Image: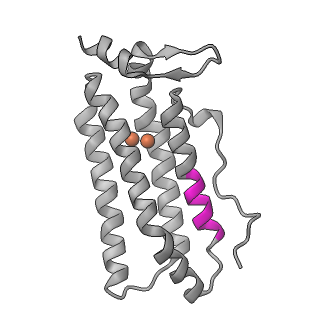
Amino acid sequence: MPDNTKELVKWSQTFSVGIKIIDDQHRELLELTNDMFRHCVGEEKAEREYFEKVIHDAVDYVKIHFATEEKIMLKTGYAGYAEHKREHESFVLNVVEQIQAYNAGKPLVLNTFTRFLKEWILTHIAVSDKRYFEHFKRIATRKANGVLSISQNDIQKAVS
Ligand SMILES: [Fe+2]
Ligand SMILES: [Fe+2]
């Protein structure tokens, strides 16, 4: 049985890059990591079943998130775009290689995999994603509720 009281990472404002769509996606990524952590129950069969059930959707979600960031970076002429995209790509490659190794018969250590995800996601948000925040902030509009958002319009204005 999954332990629902376990929480490996808690969302905090310090992770906020200040743009709602990105923050929402980061929250969801942390939630995926926590869900995985809750399923680290030490029973191989249960962990394998869980892993096989969620891993493809999790990878798809990560790709959607990376694509969202990259699209905004590209459209707004962010100078660190290529480097940032490389970080995303090497992470996806690393995860895909781990899945392939698993499919080829390598034993799954869900706990190790979950901790690897957590470390990468938190470091990436805290360091690399925060780096583009200053750039986005210059072109984003601030809504009445104080949330920064980037509209198609803002992107248009920034690139024209
Ligand atoms: Fe991100
Ligand atoms: Fe990123």
The quadrant in which the N terminus is found is bottom right
**Residue situated in front as seen by the camera: 105 or 75:** 75
Q: In the orientation shown, which residue stands out farthest toward the right?
A: 5
| Whether residue 81 can be seen here | yes
Ligand 2, image quadrant it occupies: top left
Residue 75 inside the magenta-drawn segment: no
**Residue situated in front as seen by the camera: 38 or 156:** 156
Q: Give the range drawn in magenta.
A: 30-38
Q: Position of residue 123 (x, y in %)?
A: 47, 46
| Whether residue 78 can be seen here | no
Q: Residue at x 49, y 23 (%)?
A: 149
Colouring used for the render: one colour
Give the vertical position of 158 relative to 19 (above or below): above
Query: Which SS type dominates the magenta stretch?
Result: helix
Q: Where is residue 54 in the image (x, y as percent from the top left)?
A: 49, 69
Residue 37 inside the magenta-drawn segment: yes
Total number of numbered discs in the rendering: 0
Q: Position of residue 8 (x, y in %)?
A: 65, 58
Which of the 4 quarters of the picture holds residue 33? bottom right
Q: Which residue is drawn at 61% across and 66% down?
A: 37
Which of the 4 quarters of the picture holds residue 50? bottom right
